[in-house]
Image (cartoon, rainbow, N blue to C red):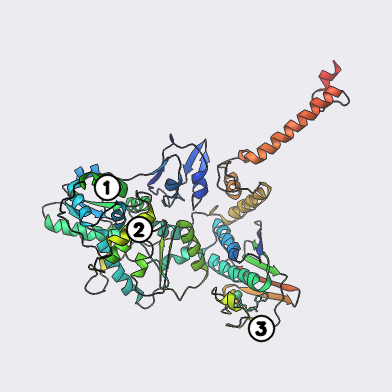
Amino acid sequence: MRNYRHSVSLDISKCKGCTTCLKRCPTEAIRIRDGHAQINSDRCIDCGECIKVCPHKAKRAVHDSLKDMKNYTVTVALPAPALYGQFNNLTNIDYIIDGLGKVGFDYVFEVACAAEMVSAYTRTYLGRDGVSKPVISSACPVITRMIGMNFPYLADHIMPLLPPVEIAAKLARDAAAREHPELSPTEIGVFLISPCPAKVSYVKNGFAGDKNNIDRVISVRDVYFALLDVMKNGSIPEGTSSAGMIGIGWATTGGESSAVFNDRYLAADGIENCIRVLEQIDNEDFTDLDFIELNACSGGCVGGAMTVANPYIAGARLGSLKRYLPVSPNRPADGDIPDYCFSDGEVHYDGGYTLSSDRNEAMRMMSEIESITAGLPGIDCGSCGAPTCEAFAEDIVKNETNADECTIIMRELFHECIERRRKELLSEKIGSSKPKNGAEVDSKK
Amino acid sequence: MSENVTFHFDVDGENFSSAGEASVLVKKKLRQLGISPEIIRRVSIAMYEGEINMVIHAEGGSADVTVTDKEVAIVLSDRGPGIPDVSLAMQEGYSTARDNIRALGFGAGMGLPNMKKYTDSMEIETKLGVGTTITMKVKLS
Ligand SMILES: Nc1ncnc2c1ncn2[C@@H]1O[C@H](COP(=O)(O)OP(=O)(O)OP(=O)(O)O)[C@@H](O)[C@H]1O
Ligand code: SF4
Ligand SMILES: [Mg+2]
């Protein structure tokens, strides 16, 4: 996909060109060139893995800021449930809803509420005839993009419903517009409080097509710090949360699938695990499974790169916050799925890994890659700037780098040179044999 | 005339947890070659089943995948026990997999039938006590 707008980006001044992110990128989108990292935009899926691992904090997620509120007459906050798990000693979600008002939002619509609706619609959808099973959740944008890049065959297994953030945005916008008939749509600002860069790029690239109702995406982290300031005093909160157990459960792995209410599901997290699961369902027919929940982040959305707390600690906090909540107060009266909940944006295979659109050329390149790889050390050390020797060979064939970037081979050549020179010097000293090249002139003297 | 590309994989029979990895690698290569998703899926399913069979029934072996401008050919060769009755083994549901293998979800007796179903041709050469070589081809168009 060309001109893809990414949230994950690099601060060159901080990047030391170490190979940490190179090794961890699940799509091999990173190379080290001229001493610093470069991200290949066609391959980046905004999973945020490099942000999490960068020891120099050179990778970051670009997102909107709370200051952008001033561009709108009326503002609505859509807090993702992961936000609730960030706070230590929080006993009641109402404090957060109240705090969001104090921070300046006119309305709050909890993503968790929309999640409960999506859970109900998922159950309806799974019961329909002719649905390709297992159905894969559409909630994590990293996963849907990964499928588009790598698993075209699974594309029609993705649930065709909009993710909760989008449904929340639609309902919140409609409600605000009803309250303020005098305002034009551009005067209402809908702000998603997101745990991850993936949702930023989901919005910025208009993946929901015409159905995109989110104007700005701000980070859980920024909102967390803003809330700390206003939530200090322990007054009785005015706002009230209306989320239930199921909605809040969506922030951690297993929450979404347990709401399917049967045991024919699989829930996995961590991008590497998710890729393995996708590889396997791509090969086998998992007809005995109904539903697959995949979260790119360890622990689920609480593990997003724009959060503050450790995902497992946040998960435990959510566990106690939801303990006495009603199960699913926001489930729709009947499970019929309204039209607006269906997504327009189909996932298409974009062949991002194809060497060349001309098959013969691709075959030629592939043979060359194979033969170059065979001559490389095969230790995948990363010092050439590519994540593996094979990726390096591919870069050479694509003319993106050259063979002498391999420091291991260079070192061998260097040793050979030194050794040769040493022998030459030695033989000069003993005078027993003539040095080989170009040294004749000297020796005659 | 374009060149052919061959990929060779050793399939480790000792390490069950790595079973299925060669087919993932092949999938990656075929994507790089711009082969259509439909063909990739057929090749990788056939290859996966064959690879698993070599691990569970034959203590490993090797896989060679050759891509030409017309087809993808997969040759799986092992030095396992051989298959005593090929037409019986080809029947859906026939399996000699032991219980511990079944517990992992294998042993439905669907591997060989799937390999046949997803490829355009399949030949089995097998000799008791010597080994088995299976050659499968998937046409590119
Ligand atoms: N490479 C092989 N060497 C020896 N025997 C084999 C080999 N491949 C298959 N067989 C025999 O053929 C039988 C049927 O194989 P098939 O792949 O169809 O089913 P399975 O492996 O038992 O179960 P499934 O593939 O559904 O997990 C096996 O149980 C085994 O007895
Ligand atoms: S798991 Fe959740 S937080 Fe992580 S990338 Fe996916 S949607 Fe974002
Ligand atoms: Mg089998």
**Label at residue B87:** 3
**Label at residue A223:** 1
Does dot 3 land on a helix, a strand or a loop? helix
- Residue B55 visible in the shown view: yes
The amino acid marked with disc number 3 is: Ser
The amino acid marked with disc number 1 is: Val
- Badge 1 local density, few (<14 within 10 Å), some, or many (20+)? many
Which quadrant of the figure has residue B63?
bottom right
Ligand 3: image quarter: bottom right
Depth check: give the residue in front, B41 or A387. A387
User: Alpha-carbon distance for marks 3 and 1?
Assistant: 66 Å
Does dot 1 land on a helix, a strand or a loop? helix
User: Earlier along the polypeptide chain: callout 2 or callout 1?
Assistant: 1
Residue at x 87% of width, y 26% of height: A433
The amino acid marked with disc number 2 is: Gly
Q: Which residue is mark 2?
A: A315
On screen, residue B17 versus residue A258, left or right, reads: right
Outermost residue, right side: A432
**Mark 2 or mark 1: which is in front?**
2
Residue at x 42% of width, y 59% of height: A143
